[in-house]
Amino acid sequence: MKSNNPLAETSPPPCRGRAREGVETMQLHCSTPILTFPLQGGRNWVGSNERSGMKPARLSLRRCSGLALLFALFALGGCSTVKDWFGSKDSAAEPAKLTGINETAKFEVRWHTDLGDSGASLLQPALTKDAIYGASGKGTLTRVDRVSGKQVWRVESDIAVSGGVGAGEGLALIGSTKGEVLAYGEDGKLRWKSKVSSEVLSAPQAAEGVVIVRSGDGRIAGLDAADGKRMWLYERSTPALVVRSHAGVTLQRGVAFAGFAGGKLAAIKISDGSLLWEVSVSQPRGATELERISDITSNPVADDEQVCAIAFQGRVACYDAAQGNSLWSRDIGSDKGMMLLRKYLYLSDARGAVIALDKTSGSTVWKNEKLFLRDTATPYALGNFVAAGDYEGYLHGLNREDGSFAARIKLDGSAIQAAPLGLDDGVLVQTRNGGLYSLSLK
């Protein structure tokens, strides 16, 4: 049985995991996202079993999304060998090995602290003008001083954190695997606790008195920032086969932009949850259900003029932010995300290449393919450089002019999955093991 899925040609080495006969869930410890589908006929859904009565087969993908997707079909469909899906083992693609570079700049660690292991979640820190907030997968929430890196306070939330950290409206926000949303004040005291329809897989966001929470079943809830009570709920239908991801929402000028299964991008009014417009970034293509997956599995990026989104196995496209009119689109797929800064759009594609695009036309400015299959995280533009992490814990600095390597540093050796954040003329990076680093690049 031979697959025509292009992911089979670009998959990193096999994931670690197991599937037992009679068990509906298989966990493979690789990288985002997760594929969910029913073991037997019926409507697919993600989340608790209250609505359908079925247990979904859930596949957690870490660092080898294409391979793990097909492992699910192997485990559930009874194929004779995994080799049948991918061809011979000798022909399997491997992540690029790093070679020496001519360093024209240097990363310097300004400070480092430990937040605790992220576990299976993709966690990222949150920045405010006065503080940094970070969390561990086991529920520890920490406030860190921006300048010194010293921990101001730590609290135990007693939840398994699967989404966080978000900040806004004077709150630090985290979500749990059970759909719990906790809001802490700047003093570390719990302000309120709420619950949404299923697990929270991305950091809650807050603006204009509303906390926006996206849950694993694709619903988006608007909670009152004062007490956590639900103000509105946005929901839409989903295809039969979806990629379960850590995609959240992007807030810009009173609008929450969100990508969905099937390649849809929506603009939602923050104040009341009403739909302003919706477009199709990518249309499903291919002969099989697996090949036709074109979900948007990362956050859109937006400025005052336009909003852009990229689909898994699909396209990248930009639209007029006010009306949703198409500006341009082209074939590039990614499950990671992008950064929009001034005239350029920076992204890492499905093969790990870091690419700079002209935001007005979508044309390629430069492309660095030397991080092939290294699970390159979303890049961040910093001064004259672009910073991006990989699965071995390396942070790479690329020249913004041509994408060539300028600097490299290895942090704690665990994967850098979330995009770096800008911090005082430098970057802030959280690793999978919970290391929080403030770095300069000069």
Image: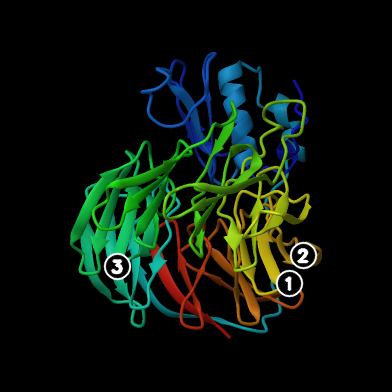
Tag 1: amino acid: Gly
How far apart marks 3 and 2 lie (CA) works out to: 40 Å
Name the element at disc 3: loop
How far apart marks 1 and 3 lie (CA) works out to: 38 Å
Residue at the image position 61 percent from the left and 24 percent from the top? 73
Return the disc, 3 or 2, that comes first in the chain's sequence. Answer: 3
Labels 2 and 1 touching (C-beta < 8 A): yes
Return the disc, 1 or 3, that comes first in the chain's sequence. Answer: 3
Tag 3: amino acid: Gly
Residue 286: x, y in percent?
77, 31
- Quadrant of residue 144 in the image? bottom left
Tag 2: amino acid: Lys
- Check disc 3 and report the residue beneath it: 170
Q: Confirm whether residue 277 shows in the render.
A: yes
Q: Residues within 10 Å of mark 2 (few under 14, many from 20)?
A: some
- Check disc 1 and report the residue beneath it: 403
- Check disc 2 and report the residue beneath it: 367
Labels 3 and 2 touching (C-beta < 8 A): no
- State whether residue 82 is above or below residue 408: above
Name the element at disc 1: loop
Return the disc, 2 or 1, that comes first in the chain's sequence. Answer: 2
Q: Residues within 10 Å of mark 3 (few under 14, many from 20)?
A: some
Residue at the image position 62 percent from the left and 40 percent from the top? 295
**Quadrant in which the C terminus is drawn:** bottom right
Residue at the image position 26 percent from the left and 46 percent from the top? 194
Q: Confirm whether residue 415 shows in the render.
A: no
